[in-house]
Image: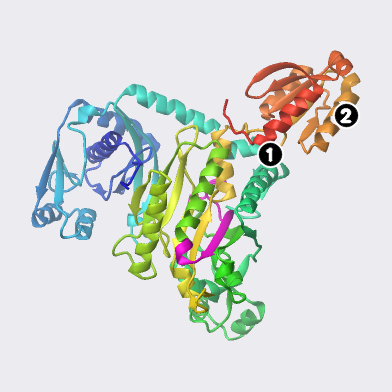
């Protein structure tokens, strides 16, 4: 079957954004000729260029840079591509001619480094735009005039090639469009996105808190926010039960040796909290006046026992599988856990719920026979599709993350990697799921399929993931007894349809603008009596809803009726029931839906039936 794929970026958009990055570099050089440039790629939502420059570029510099970019665009300068020899490109870089406006008395050292990394069999191409020349594979528009509008958005710091050992560069971000109208629409969407920011909504709706005394990136879920988590967990637990999963619970810390065997330590050492030493050993080491460096070495060498705050759930699930002999009759074994894990994210990268240091994964690990792999992958992908369908997330793309040739981070044999990649491709094709292959996006132990979802604002979030792993069973020497009564190695599949509850809640809040669908809303119904005379009736109706496990409250404040209704709207309660003298006499309510507006007067049993049906359907319509 022919592979179906999707592109993360429209080719024409890519040309515009990539070309705009070159124009940005030209504008920077006209103000600061000493600037040294590294890479300037198009990215989802815009472009950036990394630059080394003594001057700190700030938003105050954006107006003059944008004006200079508009001059370059108006000049309609052609993008001229030339394929040159490696020697010619090297000489130009040594003369400081690459990513520059003419020759300079010092080399273009980042371009020299990039040249070294280009494989010998690949052609070397340069692009001339007026007096500016850059090392680049393209593609670009025909001339600068094809870019209708540009805007610089922000500037950040970034290590060259993402390595903290390398110099820190300034990363200038921007957006580019073929027309001013598209840019204006983008700016409008940007303002809407600010209003939908989950950090803002979390505070307004009293959902969660990140307290500095508790620690950056560590989330305190308040009662209303905890309800959202519980509803999501309940939904997924029901689906897991239907599909034969068994739920388990594992500790938050484990011996360091467990993660040394798995490879998570030291492969991901930089993104983990430091190992913990038990008090007795720590007291002994203090008496020996051991340094921190010695302690770290002893921990890694196994000379002293250490513990690690859990960065991954999979090694503990592996130990559950290995806790007793297993037969092929028990396979596939599907172990699931809402397990909280901890990663050391840099403080500058922490963002509300979407980038945290402690998060809960809807994690599961399937142990199966080789001939069961494709069937289990199919079940995992179907589960992810079911989850996204229920959440109203129909706009997504699928990425097949493969190993990158020559990279050192991967473990296992090429044969096993090929089998795992082949299984993922086969099942995706059989299910008719379009995907794009992306080398370098695999986990260190195996390839994976990721679902990248677009929200109502068109922004992309990574949620569900399915990974095939032949390597961890090897590292832990897992076996089961086959029908031939001989030992065999199982295959392991990692899957998480939500990804993490924190990131999922952040995405849902922004997608729905805080107005969550009924089944997820912390408060589902608010009953508002017109006067105190209707208070008893309101309380009776509220208790009836509570008996049905519908989250309801009575507004008993002393404000005016209009103020009470306005407060419920601000707090985005799905249904407001107004009860006055007539409603009390007829056992009715006057109903207002947050999204649907005034629904008129309803008989109480009719309204309750509507609520129960809507909750049961788990509808997530934006209508």
Q: CA distance from mark 1 to mark 2?
A: 27 Å
The mark found on residue 279 in the picture is none
- Give the vertical position of 290 relative to 372 (above or below): below
Q: Which residue is found at the position 52% from the left and 73% from the top?
A: 483
Q: Position of residue 334 (x, y in %)?
A: 58, 61
Quick one: label 1, few (<14), some, or many (20+) residues within 10 Å? some
Can residue 559 be seen here? The reply is: no
Question: Which residues lie in the magenta part?
Answer: 348-372
- Give the vertical position of 9 relative to 572 (above or below): below
Q: How is the image coloured?
A: rainbow
Can residue 384 be seen here? The reply is: yes
Q: Is residue 352 magenta?
A: yes
- Give the vertical position of 618 relative to 303 (above or below): above
Tell which of 202 and 416 is nearer to you: 416
Tell which of 49 and 389 is nearer to you: 389
Q: Is residue 285 magenta?
A: no
Q: Which residue is tagged 1?
A: 206
- Contact between labelled residues 2 and 1, with CB atoms less than 8 Å apart: no
Q: Which residue is tagged 2?
A: 540
Q: Which residue is found at the position 31% from the left and 31% from the top?
A: 66
Q: Position of residue 299 (x, y in %)?
A: 52, 78
In the image: residue 293, left or right of residue 4:
right
Residue 526 appears in which quarter of the rendering? Answer: top right
Tell which of 436 and 126 is nearer to you: 436
Work out whether mark 1 precedes mark 2 in sequence or the reverse, and give the earlier one: 1
Which residue in the rendered view is the most extreme toward the top?
Answer: 582
Q: Position of residue 369 (x, y in %)?
A: 49, 66
Which residue in the rendered view is the most extreme toward the front?
Answer: 484
Which residue in the rendered view is the most extreme toward the bottom?
Answer: 288
Q: Position of residue 562 (x, y in %)?
A: 74, 17
Residue 533 appears in which quarter of the rendering? Answer: top right
């Amino acid at each position: 079957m022919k592979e179906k794929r999707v592109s993360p970026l429209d080719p024409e958009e890519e040309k515009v954004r990539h070309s705009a990055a070159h124009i940005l570099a030209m504008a920077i050089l006209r103000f600061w000729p000493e600037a040294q440039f590294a890479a300037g790629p198009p990215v989802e939502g815009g472009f950036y260029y990394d630059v080394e420059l003594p001057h700190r570029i700030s938003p105050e510099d954006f107006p003059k840079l944008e004006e200079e970019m508009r001059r370059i665009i108006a000049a309609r300068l052609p993008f001229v591509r030339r394929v040159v020899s490696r020697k010619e490109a090297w000489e130009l870089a040594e003369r400081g001619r690459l990513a520059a406006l003419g020759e300079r008395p010092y080399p273009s050292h980042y371009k020299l480094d990039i040249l070294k990394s280009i494989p010998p069999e690949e052609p070397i191409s340069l692009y001339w735009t007026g007096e500016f020349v850059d090392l680049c594979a393209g593609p670009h528009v025909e001339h600068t005039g094809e870019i209708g509008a540009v805007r610089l958005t922000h500037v950040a710091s970034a290590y060259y090639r993402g390595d903290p050992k390398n110099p820190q560069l300034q990363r200038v971000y921007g957006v580019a469009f073929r027309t001013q109208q598209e840019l204006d629409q983008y700016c409008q969407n940007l303002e809407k996105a600010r209003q939908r920011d989950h950090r803002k909504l979390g505070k307004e709706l009293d959902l969660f808190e990140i307290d500095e005394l508790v620690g950056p990136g560590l989330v305190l879920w308040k009662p209303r926010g905890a309800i959202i988590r519980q509803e999501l967990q309940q939904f997924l637990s029901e689906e897991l039960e239907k599909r034969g999963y068994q739920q388990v619970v594992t500790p938050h810390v484990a011996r360091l040796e467990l993660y040394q065997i798995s490879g998570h330590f030291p492969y991901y050492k930089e993104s983990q909290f430091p190992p913990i030493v038990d008090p007795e050993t720590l007291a002994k080491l203090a008496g020996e006046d051991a340094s921190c460096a010695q302690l770290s070495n002893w921990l890694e060498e196994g000379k002293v026992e250490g513990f690690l705050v859990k960065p991954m759930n999979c090694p503990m699930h592996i130990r559950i599988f290995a806790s007793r002999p297993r037969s092929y009759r028990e396979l596939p074994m599907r172990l699931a856990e809402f397990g909280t894990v901890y990663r050391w994210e840099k403080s500058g990268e922490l963002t509300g719920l979407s980038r945290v240091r402690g998060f809960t994964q809807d994690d599961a690990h399937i142990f199966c026979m080789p001939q069961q792999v494709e069937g289990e992958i199919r079940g995992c992908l179907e589960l992810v599709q079911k989850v996204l369908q229920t959440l109203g997330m129909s706009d997504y793309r699928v990425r097949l993350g493969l190993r990158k040739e020559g990279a050192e981070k991967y473990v296992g044999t090429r044969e096993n990697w090929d089998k795992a990649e082949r299984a993922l491709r086969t099942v995706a094709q059989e299910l008719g799921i379009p995907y794009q292959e992306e080398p370098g996006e695999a986990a260190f132990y195996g390839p994976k399929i990721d679902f990248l979802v677009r929200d109502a604002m068109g922004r992309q979030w990574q949620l569900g993931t399915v990974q095939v792993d032949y390597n961890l069973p090897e590292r832990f020497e897992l076996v089961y007894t086959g029908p031939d009564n001989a030992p065999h190695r199982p295959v392991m599949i990692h899957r998480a349809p939500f990804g993490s509850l924190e990131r999922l809640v952040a995405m849902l809040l922004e997608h729905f603008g805080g107005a969550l669908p009924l089944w997820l809303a912390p408060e589902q119904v608010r009953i508002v009596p017109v006067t105190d005379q209707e208070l008893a009736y309101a309380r009776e109706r509220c208790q009836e809803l509570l008996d049905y496990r519908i989250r309801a409250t009575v507004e008993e404040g002393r404000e005016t009726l209009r103020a009470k209704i306005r407060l419920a709207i601000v707090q985005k309660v799905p249904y407001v029931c107004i009860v006055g003298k007539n409603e009390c006499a007829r056992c009715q309510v006057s109903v207002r839906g947050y999204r649907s507006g005034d629904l008129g007067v309803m008989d109480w049993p009719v309204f309750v039936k509507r609520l129960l049906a809507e909750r049961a359907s788990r509808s997530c319509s934006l209508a």
